C-alpha cells in the first residue's frame, strides 16, 4: 500500500506541479498582507483536494454514465498525459494549462484578492487541469475497496498540503530557482510524467486486449 500511495503521489506531483502556478500566485497576491496571501493559498489547496476527492469517488460512475470503458479512458488519458510530458521536456510547459499571461490581475489599491481567483484560475486549471483530473479518474476507476480508495485520497491530501507549502514559499522558490531552474524542473517532471503515461497506456492496452498484452 505504501508503494501504491507513493506512485500516486508522484503522478499527482508531476501533473499538478504547483511550481507552474507560482508566478500567477505572486501576481495575484502582490502588495497584500500575509493573512490574505495565506487565505488564497488555503482556498486553492482545498480546491485541489476537493477536486481529487470528487473524481476519486465519482470517477467510475461518470465513465459508466457516459458509456466509456475504463480501458478506452486509460488509453486516451495515457496518450494525453504522454503528449503533456513531451511538451514539458521540450520546455514548452503543459499545453492543456493556460499561460499566466492570459489572466489580468487587478491590483487596485484597497482591493483584496478575490477568493474566487484562488479557485479559478489558480487551482483550476493552473494547477489541476485536464491531465490531472484524467489521471484521478483513471486511478479511481481501476480501484476497489475502501483501502485503495483511501490511498488515492491520502495522496490527494498530501499533494494539497504540498501545493499550500509551495504557494506560501512562492517568492523564495522563484528567487532561488529563477526562470532557468523552474525550466529545468519542468523538464525533469516531464521525464517522470512520460513514465507515468507509458504505464497508463500499457494498463489500458492490457484492459482492452488482454490476450495480446500480457
Image (spheres, rainbow, N blue to C red):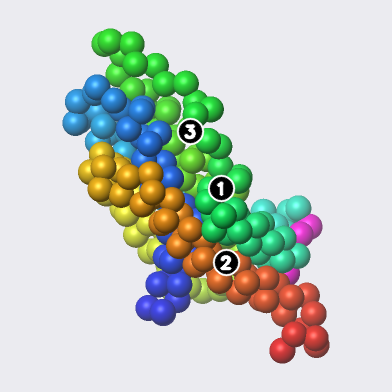
**Alpha-carbon neighbours of circle 2 within 10 Å: few (<14), some, or many (≥20)?**
many
Residue closer to the observer: 16 or 85: 85
- Tell me how far mark 2 sits from mark 3, CA to CA: 24 Å
For the point 36% across and 40% down, the residue is 22
Q: Which mark lies nearer to you, 2 or 1?
A: 1
Image quadrant of residue 43?
A: top left
Residue closer to the observer: 136 or 148: 136
Q: Is residue 172 above or below residue 59?
A: above
Residue furthest left in the image: 34
**Alpha-carbon neighbours of circle 3 within 10 Å: few (<14), some, or many (≥20)?**
some
Kindly tell me whether residue 46 is visible in this rendering. Answer: no
Q: Main secondary structure of the magenta part?
A: loop
Give the magenta part as a residue range. 67-71
Label placed on residue 100: 3
Label placed on residue 92: 1
Q: Residue 61: x and y, percent?
A: 65, 57
Number of callouts in the render?
3
For the point 58% across and 59% down, the residue is 85
- Mark 2, residue position: 194
For the point 38% across and 64% down, the residue is 154
Amino acid at each position: 500500500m505504501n508503494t501504491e500511495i507513493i506512485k500516486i503521489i508522484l503522478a499527482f506531483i508531476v501533473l499538478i506541479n504547483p511550481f507552474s502556478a507560482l508566478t500567477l500566485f505572486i501576481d495575484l497576491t502582490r502588495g497584500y498582507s500575509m493573512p490574505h496571501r495565506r487565505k488564497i493559498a488555503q482556498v486553492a489547496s482545498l480546491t485541489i483536494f476537493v477536486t481529487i476527492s470528487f473524481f476519486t469517488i465519482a470517477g467510475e460512475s461518470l465513465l459508466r454514465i457516459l458509456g466509456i470503458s475504463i480501458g478506452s479512458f486509460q488509453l486516451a488519458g495515457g496518450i494525453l498525459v504522454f503528449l503533456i510530458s513531451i511538451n514539458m521536456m521540450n520546455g514548452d510547459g503543459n499545453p492543456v494549462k493556460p499561460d499566466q499571461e492570459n489572466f489580468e490581475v487587478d491590483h487596485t489599491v484597497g482591493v483584496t484578492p478575490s477568493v474566487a481567483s484562488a479557485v479559478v484560475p489558480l487551482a483550476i486549471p493552473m494547477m489541476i487541469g485536464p491531465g490531472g483530473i484524467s489521471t484521478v479518474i483513471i486511478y479511481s476507476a481501476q480501484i476497489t475497496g475502501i483501502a485503495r480508495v483511501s490511498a488515492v485520497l491520502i495522496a490527494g491530501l498530501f499533494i494539497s498540503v504540498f501545493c499550500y507549502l509551495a504557494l506560501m514559499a512562492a517568492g523564495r522558490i522563484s528567487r532561488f530557482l529563477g526562470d532557468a531552474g523552474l525550466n529545468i524542473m519542468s523538464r525533469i517532471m516531464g521525464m517522470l510524467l512520460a513514465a507515468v503515461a507509458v504505464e497508463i497506456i500499457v494498463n489500458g492496452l492490457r484492459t482492452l486486449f488482454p490476450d495480446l498484452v500480457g
